[in-house]
Image (cartoon, rainbow, N blue to C red):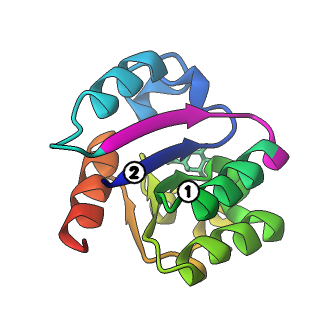
Amino acid sequence: MTSILVLNGPNLNRLGSREPDVYGSTTFPELVTELEGSSQGSETIVVRQTNSESELIEWLHEAVDTGSHVVLNPAAFTHYSYALRDAAALVSKAGLSLVEVHISNPHAREEFRHTSVISGVATGVIAGFGIDSYRLALAAIRSRL
Ligand code: DQA
C-alpha cells in the first residue's frame, strides 16, 4: 500500500482568501477534499497544514517512520528553515520521494523567494501551476513507484 502525506506550511490555511490573485480561489478545505478524494487503488493520501515549524518537522519524521512519500509545500519556511531542510533530507535518504511544491512561481516574485533551502534535498520541485502543482506532484510520486 502506498501512503502519501501532503504537508503544508504557514498561512496556507488561508488559501482562498489570502492573495487570491497569487494563490487562487480554492480554499484549504476544498484542496483537502480534492486531493484526499483523488487517491488511486489502495493508495492513501492525507493532507495537513500547520503554522508551526516544529509540527512540520515532526510530520516529516512520521513520514520516515511510516514509509510515507511526501508532497511538501513549505510556504515561507522554504526560504530559510535549515531545520526543515534537515528533516526533509531524512525523507529522501530513507528512499522515499519528497516533492517540493509551490502554488505560485517563487522565481517570478520577490528576490527573497528565489532561494529554496529545501530544493537541494527534494526529489524534485513543481512550482507555478496553481493547485495543479499538487496534482502534478502526486503524479510524479506515482510514476516513481
Ligand atoms: C508558496 C510560496 C512561498 O514563497 C510563500 O511564502 C508561500 C506559498 C507557494 O505555494 O507559492 O506561503 O510556497
Residue that mark 2 sits on: 3
* Mark 2 or mark 1, earlier in chain: 2
Q: Which residues are magenta?
A: 44-54
In which quadrant of the rendered image does the C terminus lie?
bottom left
Tell me residue 132's x, y (percent): 26, 44
Q: CA distance from mark 2 to mark 1?
A: 8 Å
Which amino acid is tagged 1?
Thr
Out of 57 and 120, give the one closest to the viewer. 57
Neighbour class for label 1 at 10 Å: few (<14), some, many (≥20)? few
- Give the percent coordinates (x, y) of residue 91: 58, 71
- Residue 17: % across, % down: 52, 16
* Residue at 37% in and 40% down: 45
Q: Against 108, is 73 above or below?
A: above
Residue labelled with disc 1: 66
Secondary structure category for the residue under label 1: helix
- For residue 1, side relative to residue 21 (left or right): left
Beta carbon at label 2 within 8 Å of ligand 1: no
